[in-house]
Amino acid sequence: MVKKPAEFAILKIGDREVKLPIIAGTEGDCGIDVSSLRKETGMITVDPGLGNTAACYSSISYINGEKGELRYRGIPIEELVKKVQFIDVAYLLVHGELPGTEERRKFSDLLNVDSLMHEDMRHFFDLFPQGSHPMHILSTMINAMASFYPNVDLKSLADDIDSSCARVISIVRTMAAFAYKKSIGEPVVYPRHDLSYCANFLNMMFDSPVKPYHIHPETVRLLNVLFILHADHEQNCSTTVVRSIGSAQVNLYATISAGISALSGPLHGGANQAVIEMLRMIHEDGDINKFVRMAKAKDNAFRLMGFGHRVYRTFDPRAVIIRQECENYLNLIHCNDPLLDTAHRLEEIATKDPYFVDRQLYPNVDFYTGILYRAMGIPENMFTVMFALARLPGWVAHWKEMIGSGTKIVRPRQIYIGKELVASEEVEDRNNSKII
């Protein structure tokens, strides 16, 4: 709940003073409400990257970057990964509360019923060129869902948000597995009614007519953990895209498709794949200190992927969990991944180096995630897809929150730095030109 302004900020422009309300939420940052600034002064604010701008009010997730905290609807992620499954978190994000026994059963049933995509959509996979990135396939396929499942306008969603939420969360999981099977030339595996959400995905990914997949309970548990840790993260790039696109009252599927496109960038969802590529390069070279020196050099474009975060200033709480889970899982399955050793050595060197310590560059959630996915058998070109699957309930929750708050269409201002007015005589009349 937004607190009423108890105090105001005074902005001085020349001899004039403007009184601007100070807005405080439940906890965290306070903000100066500048919504009336242009009307009162003729001026606007400038904040490239929006690092100092609150573009909305939200009650979904909360980050304390100084203390290394992340909570969903008030619940710390450390509690969620220990006590609930991903479908519980999906329900929590969308509805605001963890589901009761009956609510959980109904939501689970919806996930099962809505796990099959329209059979005609299967033919679309044959039209993508060999080697197409799964994120591009996924974005296109989700956008196409509006033609096969057209009832995603505001009224239908308000009447049946559970079904709409379950459909997108469940079908996209099936699409992702189908895209992977298509890429390796194997027949698709359909979802099973007797498997949980994460177990179903693993089975669709790895089961084969000639080599049945054994579903390991610990792998299922870990996938739940990974999905929970990535389910939401305040107003990150892709979530901001979802809210911006959704403000035009675009249908849910097109909105999610836009979020996936934003997530596909190497500076956002693609970072975990970039970490693996970096660790492999360092391992093959063998000289970790050389790469640390390169990262510190002002005239070198090389950077240590998986270090630092836009919000966290002490540590990323998700990274702490993933690091321990990664070590435990690799020991359990007797996997000796040399990239894990490289990651440990790189972390040890970087976290003791004043250059990285002073700049608060600590390992983030992406640093160990890729190693864990590798151990689970997930191919590298599917890493960002895994991120997208996890983030779906967060996107849906923000979309739902945004349309329920009467948000106006997003339309930022700009500071124009182009040419001044060009005189009419300087523009050549080409209406009679014979050149096409």
Image (cartoon, rainbow, N blue to C red):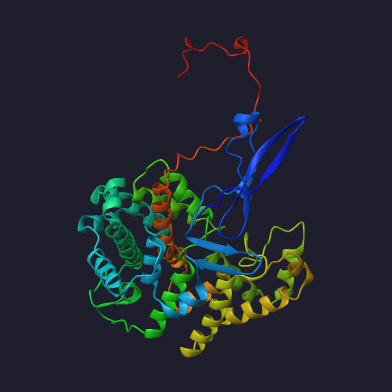
For the point 52% across and 76% down, the residue is 78
For the point 52% across and 81% down, the residue is 326
Most extreme residue toward the left, as rendered? 119
Number of numbered discs: 0
Res 64 quadrant in image: bottom right
Q: Is residue 308 left or right of residue 213?
A: right
Residue 364 visible in image: no
Q: Is residue 313 left or right of residue 87?
A: right
Q: Is residue 110 above or below residue 374?
A: above
Q: Is residue 274 above or below residue 32?
A: below
Res 203 quadrant in image: bottom left
Res 415 quadrant in image: top right
- For this rendering, which residue is in front, 394 or 58? 58
- For this rendering, which residue is in front, 87 or 432? 87
Residue 397 appears at what percent x and percent y? 41, 57
Residue 305 appears at what percent x and percent y? 62, 65
Q: Is residue 346 above or below residue 418?
A: below
Q: Is residue 257 above or below residue 212?
A: above
Residue 352 appears at what percent x and percent y? 75, 76
- Which quarter of the rendered picture does the C terminus lie within? top left
Residue 404 appears at what percent x and percent y? 39, 48
- For this rendering, which residue is in front, 253 or 44? 44
Residue 85 visible in image: yes
For the point 60% across and 43% down, the residue is 33
For the point 71% across and 66% down, the residue is 360
